[in-house]
Image: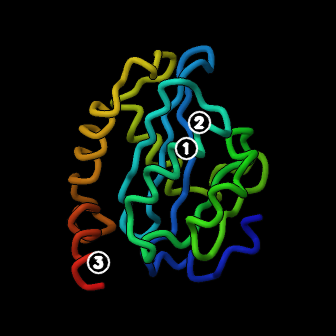
Amino acid sequence: MIDHRPQVVNDRSRFGDWEGDLIIGTRTRSAIGTLVDRKSGYAVLLHLPGGHTAAEVNASLITAMSALPQELRRTLTWDQGAEMASHDKIASLFTDGVFFAHAGKPWQRGSNENMNGLLRQYFPKHTNLAIHSADDLAVVAAKINNRPRKRLGWTTPAELLVHELKSS
C-alpha cells in the first residue's frame, strides 16, 4: 500500500517515482495507460490497442519502462484496478517497489490525476481511444512534455529529464 512507500517519494525530490493509471474510452472498451514522473511531470503514454487486461498493461509497462535507465525507475504507484492484478510481473522494473493508493482515494496519485486531466484535451471522454496509434500517443506525449510548467520554474518536463540524464 501507499503507506509503505519511501518518504522521499512524497517530497518529489528525486526522479524515477512514477504514478500510473488508465484513461478509459467509451463503454470501457478502450484505454490509454498514463505514467507521470512525480518530480519532473514527464509523461509516458502506454499504447493498449488490444485492451487493458493485466497482461496487456504489464506488457506495455515493461516495454515503456525498460527503455529508461534504472535510476529513472524507482517506484510505481497505481490505483487498485484489475489491470494491475499481475503487478508482481513488473515489480522487478522498479528498485524501490510497486505501491497502491487506497481504494476510492485518487488524490493519493495527484500527479497522475492532474496529467489525466491534461490528456483529456487530446483524448476526450466518451470516445474510442483505440483509434489512436502509438505514433499519435508519442506526438501527444511530446506536446505535454515540452509544455513549460510553473512549478518547474517555467522549464519543461523534457528539459528537466534530459538534464538529469546528462548529470547522472
Cα–Cα gap, marks 1 and 2: 5 Å
Determine crowd level at label 3: few under 14, some 14-19, many 20+ residues with C-alpha closer than 10 A.
some
Q: How many marks?
A: 3
Which picture quadrant has residue 42? bottom left
Q: Earlier in the sequence, mark 3 or mark 1?
A: 1
Residue type of the residue flagged with mark 2: Glu
Q: Is residue 152 above or below residue 117?
A: below
Residue lying at 60% horizontally and 31% vertically, measured from the top left: 52
The kind of secondary structure element at disc 3 is: helix
The kind of secondary structure element at disc 2 is: helix
Residue lying at 65% horizontally and 58% vertically, measured from the top left: 108
Give the residue pinned by disc 2: 56
Q: Nearer the viewer, mark 3 or mark 2?
A: 2
Verify CB contact (< 8 Å) between mark 1 and mark 2: yes
Q: Earlier in the sequence, mark 3 or mark 2?
A: 2
Determine crowd level at label 1: few under 14, some 14-19, many 20+ residues with C-alpha closer than 10 A.
some
Verify CB contact (< 8 Å) between mark 3 and mark 1: no
Residue type of the residue flagged with mark 3: Glu
The answer to whether residue 114 is left or right of residue 26 is: left
Res 158 label: none
The answer to whether residue 53 is left or right of residue 118 is: right
Give the residue pinned by disc 1: 59
Residue type of the residue flagged with mark 1: Ala
